[in-house]
Amino acid sequence: MTKDLDTEGRVLEAAKRVFIRKGYAGARMQEIADEAGINKGLLHYYFKSKDNLFSAIFEQAFREMVPRQNELFESDLPLFIKLEQFVERYLDFLSEHPYLPAFVLLELQRHPEAFLQRISGMDMKPNPMKLVMQIQMEAQKGAIRIINPIHLVVNILSMCVFPFVARPMMQAMLQVSDADYALFIRDRKEVIVDFVKNALHPAPSTLH
């Protein structure tokens, strides 16, 4: 039997929809097969296990995200515009793939070495070094307060990722529907950008 790329693509799209509804832990291969309109045996022919299927989805999403972010990192945009677009693109990506953050954390707990080896083996990786240098240069000029650029990037990533990782807890605490939570995520773009701008604002000089 020869694998058909159209069927494989249909399976991946069906799996994404199931993972969005159920998360990684709650998704079942039978449900994915039903969503794709194929039998479970054929699904196992294309992807031997749920782990293999999810790995394929992760790599597909990773290859989609990295070039877009690296293009932004390498651009000559002013720092605040670059940071704003970074937040917007990353939140849009997570909104399209909300199951990924929890999967990454799970894999880092279960198989850290294998997961990191998979990332390092990919032909494209995030490269924020030009952004890091730009932050350092702006700090040296006094345009922003002095800050460790790595901490800044990690802080931005954390503020974006946490609402997706903690979504069940957040929705329960806030008592909001899926639609309302989507609006909450949309509002995060402006909130995070404002928070970062305020955090980077130079400290007022003191007269002695």
Image (cartoon, helix red, strand yellow):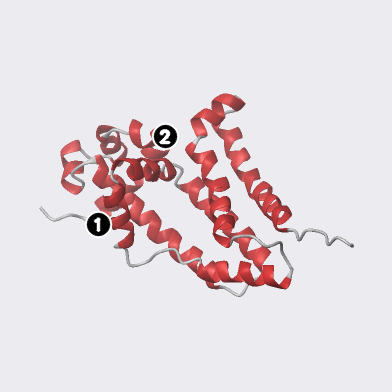
Q: Position of residue 156 (x, y in %)?
A: 58, 52
Q: Amino acid at mark 2?
A: Arg
Name the image quarter holding residue 124.
bottom left
**Which residue is more in the foreground, 41 or 120?**
120
Q: Which of marks 1 and 2 precedes in the sequence?
A: 1
Q: Is residue 98 left or right of residue 175?
A: left
Residue 6 picture location, percent across and down: 27, 54
Q: Which mark is residue 5?
A: 1
Describe residue 16's horizontal placement relative to residue 208 as left or right: left
Residue furthest left in the image:
1
- Residue 38 in picture, x, y percent from top left: 23, 40
- Name the image quarter holding residue 134: bottom right
Q: Residues within 10 Å of mark 2 (few under 14, many from 20)?
A: few
Closer to us: 159 or 9: 159
- Specify the farthest residue to the bottom: 76
Amino acid at pointer 1: Leu
Q: Do the numbered discs 2 and 1 sit on residues whose CB atoms are within 8 Å? A: no
Could you say whether the residue bearing mark 2 is in a helix, strand or loop? helix
Residue 21's disc is 2
In the image, 204 versus 132, the foreground residue is: 204
